[in-house]
Amino acid sequence: MYSKRKIVHIDMDAFFASIEQKDTPAFQGKPLIVGGRPESRGVVAACSYEARRFGIHSAMPCSQAIRLCPQAIFTKPRMDRYREISTQLMAIFRRFTPLVEPLSLDEAFLDVTTNNQNHPSATILAQRIRSEIFEELHLTASAGVSFNKFLAKVASDFKKPNGLTTIPPEKAVDFLSVLPIRRFFGVGKVTEKKMLRLGIKTGHDLRRMDKETLVCHFGKTGLFLYDIVRGIDNRPVEPTRERKSIGSETTLCCDTNDKNEIHTILSHLAEQIEYSLKKKQTGGYTLTLKVRYHDFTTITRSQTVQAPIYSSAGILSLVPGLLATTRVGAAKVRLLGLSISKLTGNKRIPRQLVLPFMQQGSL
């Protein structure tokens, strides 16, 4: 019934915060928050396990974090440093297998069914990977081992931090039966509430639901859940994952409904996106505007065009139309974001240039 694949999911422990603690010994063992200043409108990008004991978590307003832990240390993110360490991390993974699928800077799936070390045990390989990470990067990682991606990812979170969990085929059903429904991939807060109303609290409860009922209530997600609670997940480990969007967003220092200020901010975001598009040698067909109002209500508005967008000018030409469908100007705003999706790939699509003989009135 189950595949014979051997999948490892590696997830670094408090990656950003751990790097800061490694680089600055004075931060070690202290509640550390990577993000904005406590008096700012910024949010927590990451935090150490010492900070998590106070209930602090990522995306929490820094002003709230300092109230929970007045002795917390705040430091700004250093993305270049995190990318540098991530590059070294991925190099370690590729010593073991070419089938590495990065999910972010600090986690990845590895298919070690066949591997560079010709070792039959995925669990032993996962332990070796963790050991090399610690020896070379002086950071800890948690690992999950199983026969599919879903179970490997769930397993890596089971004994965090610095843990290793293996779920073999014969134990998959028992493991999934007692798993709280919120731990299932694809189940967010809204879906969890809906499931609880249906009496679905664990994998055991989910397994009792027939496919038609799940699809009726949850659409395509219902089909996915029907399979994974039975240990079925045939998604391959994909070494080359295409980036699906390029974007930038910012939390404002003060709420504003000043349209001129908002336009200035969006112009700056558009310039950042243009830089990223040029760096990736790509463009995109869909522009999305993200707005978070003063009451934390968040909305998005999108527009898809026929010719790909490559520049800040192209982005800004669409922004007024998107803004017109929001309450910007009437309601105060605390966050703005722009992103380009439906990317063209790493080759610019040829565009027709306007030539002198193509002016109005010409054939």
Image: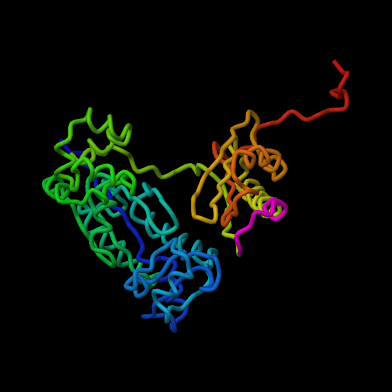
Q: Is residue 347 above or below residue 330?
A: above
Q: Residue at x 57, y 59 (%)?
A: 251
Residue 256 in magenta stretch: yes
Q: Where residue 361 sits: x, y (%)? A: 88, 18
- Where residue 139 appears, x then y in whole percent? 37, 70
Left or right: 138, with 127 as reference point: right
Q: As displayed, is residue 105 above or below residue 217?
A: below
Total marks in image: 0
In this figure, which colouring scheme has been used for the structure?
Answer: rainbow
Tell me if residue 353 comes above or below residue 288 in the rendering.
above
Quadrant of res 250: bottom right
Foreground residue among 38 and 6: 38
- Furthest residue toward bottom: 26
For residue 355, side relative to residue 46 (left or right): right
Viewer-side residue, 55 vs 239: 55
Q: In the image, what residue occupies the spot 53% across and 69% down?
A: 36
Side (left or right) of 319 relative to 134: right
Q: Residue at x 28, y 49 (%)?
A: 112
Tell me the residue at 84%/28% (across/down). Answer: 355
Q: Which residues are magenta?
A: 254-263
Quarter of the image containing the N terminus? top left
Q: Is residue 119 left or right of residue 272?
A: left
Q: Quadrant of residue 294?
A: bottom right
Q: Position of residue 39 (x, y in %)?
A: 54, 73
Q: Quadrant of the C terminus?
A: top right
